[in-house]
Image: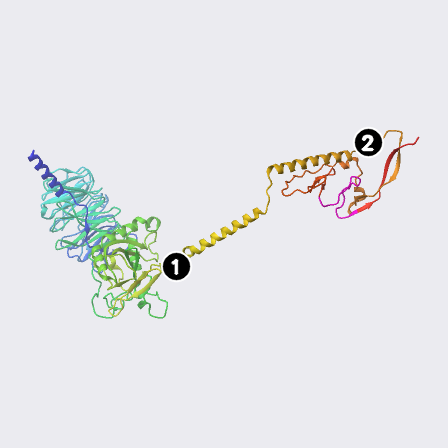
Amino acid sequence: MAADMRTSILMMLIVLLLAPVTAASSSGMNFLNATTATAADAYTNSVTTNANNTLIASSYGTFVEIHNASSLELIERFSLEREIFDIDFSPDGQYIAVSTFADTTVPNSIRVINVNDMSFKSEMARGNIRPGNIDWSYDGSMLIAPNINNGASVFNSTHMGEIFGLNGIHTSDVTCVAFSRTGEFMLTGDELGRLQLWDNTGEPIDVEINVDEEIVGCDFSDMDVKFAAATKSGNVYSYTVSGDLLQSRDFGENFGVRWSYTEDILYVLESDSNPELKAIDGSTFSDLHSTRLVHMSLDFSIIESNGMLAKFYVSTNTNHIAIYGSPPYPEGYGMMGSDLDGDNVPDTLDMDDDGDSFKDDWDFNCLNVTLCSREPDLTTIRSIVVSLDSDTLIVEDIYTMSSENTYMFRNLSRRSILADQRISYEETNMIESAFCNNMDKNDYLQRLENSLELSFGEVANGTLQCEILAGLSFSKTFDKEQLQFSFKTSFDVSPNISLPLTIYFDNQISVLDSSITHMVENHPILIEQITLEGDSLTTLWWNSDGDQKPQLNFTAIPQQASQINTFVELLNDNIILISASVTGLTLLIWVLIRRRNLNSLILDDSEFDEELNLEESMEQSYLEYVEDEYTKPQPIVDDGFTNLQVEDEPIITETIPSEERPTDRRAFMIDDDEEVSVKRSVRRRTGRVDRNAQGPIMSTKRKRLDGKLDIPGEKLITAKKPVRKGTKDVLTSKKVRRVKTVKKDD
């Protein structure tokens, strides 16, 4: 049992040691520059360099172009009049082998370019109609390329005659071929995933390897110890020459693998949404370092120095070959001479004297009569924005690229530009990822922290955030807006920030040797301070010994009391006086109400009811009396009565209104005295009741039979003097003859 446990532990340790590590550090390499193809619509698909790294050869469509590796100038352009699959420099750098589409009418599809005289060799050979690579032997004496017979052919590089064919094993088109470093072996892989080893005489080695997927890349390691193969979906495998599987790993979509020339390092070119060149340990497949790319990638060529990656070239599927490496110092750096912007390059060699991202010959961004090339545009020079947030100091370092470099980056990521003429978010994120991941963040944070000095406390624990601010998303290739990106750093201030606080900058830091900032102007700097009130204060800081170092002063915000706070404070300060005043006013109101209540008499309910009953009985008696006194006259039918005319006293009647016409006058009716009386609500009376000998003196309004009210204080109208409706303004007296019926005398 103990033996089994020891075996299990040993197996676990082996697995841990062999397991790949996915976290890789940055290689320190950044985008340097790019060659430009003659055709604006070129799609470069292969690239190769000569032995001494002085020439860059690339292909697109039916053309091969050769550029100078230093100046990037075009040296020569060749047309082959058919689609080019692959190109490769010979080991000595004198020839370039070109594999093209093998047309049935013109079968000779493999050509060789003599670099010395920039011409084609007359000798040619036949290749395949299926895309595949081409490879030179270690001494340059032979060439290997896929053929049309589901195999590969080995040619003599001098006369291009076939030495032998590698046929009879594959059942599909060969897509990858390779010579070993010692020349002892050859390797072929097909589109079905079959890998086959061959000896140097063209005989197959009894090793059967099948990965069940199209092979897109294959190569031997140094000393022919092992070989690797990459599949179309991104799986990478390593095997011994005896056919034993060593390692496998899924890297995502890729377009080839390369072993280091002297070290056990395997380079894998990923080409997904975040393309990068990864360097992995050849034994464990653990990540060593990586370089993010700002474009698509189809092929690559590496240059090593002392076993380390020094530079590499990538075909971009655009009209560029992108170049990556360690950023060099600009030409003329450190030389003596007048230097306006302080970038250590004399103005005589500096293409941008004022550091505003506009070349001197095209610098027209000024508003006065001075020379524009010596007056920087404050919107395009490097700027540093400083602000405070609680106990955090925030420093945002903003850079602006020139128009030429902006156009180049847009063109390198032009996958969506071809469709909608604008950069997409995906492409912006791809470039942003390359800018941020390829820089040495620790170096930048350390330099920035050392350049800051506080009047109280110190900064620590810096965190860096990198982002593109403008110039890419939804921009066309030649839009005028320039590409801007920033490094935003947040520092903890210890102990806590205490105001007032002064921040000093000791020097203008530069990380052009470890970031993409080598492509932009680093000096001078516009210092922008965001005060605690939210205001912006700017200072132009020139990079010279005599220039005063900027000092940023942060003071406490003066508290302005609001009206509500002022009112509350006033209440608190005079609470005693206000309380006494309120209490006194309350007592005064209570006394006045009490005094008024004492002067009024409130009758008992019983007295009030008796008075109401008395009023109702008297009103009923009065109504009965009026009904008895004023009744309708009955017609006299007795012959014993006769009509006599008797003069009676005048009755007051209302005059006819002046505007009433005689025709409008209404005839006299007997029923006029029986008008409906208007009902009035009886109000209760309180207080003292006056009485006389006949009873209580009534002062209420009485209803009359003619519908009017008998109002106390007004003149009473007797029953003998009825008043008819008329004008209310004028009352006139008129004699009326009244007929009285009397009984005849016998």
- Residue 244 at what x, y percent from top left? 11, 39
* Residue 514 appears in the figure: no
Residue type marked 2: Gln
Which residues fall within the magenta stretch? 712-731
Which residue is the site of mark 1? Answer: 560
Mark 2 falls on what kind of element?
Answer: loop
Query: Is residue 715 highlighted in magenta?
Result: yes
- Residue 63 at what x, y percent from top left? 25, 52
**Classed neighbour count for the residue bearing mark 2: other residues with Cα under 10 Å, few (<14), some (14–19), many (≥20):** few
Mark 1 falls on what kind of element?
Answer: loop
Q: Quadrant of the N terminus?
A: top left
Image: 280 above or below 71: above
Taking depth in this image into account, of 557 and 396 the one nearest to the observer is 557
Which comes sooner in the sequence, label 2 or label 1? 1
**In whole angstroms, how far apart are the C-alphas of marks 2 and 1?**
98 Å
* Residue 634: mark: 2
- Residue 353 at what x, y percent from top left? 28, 67
The residue that appears at 31% across and 67% down in the rendered structure is 373
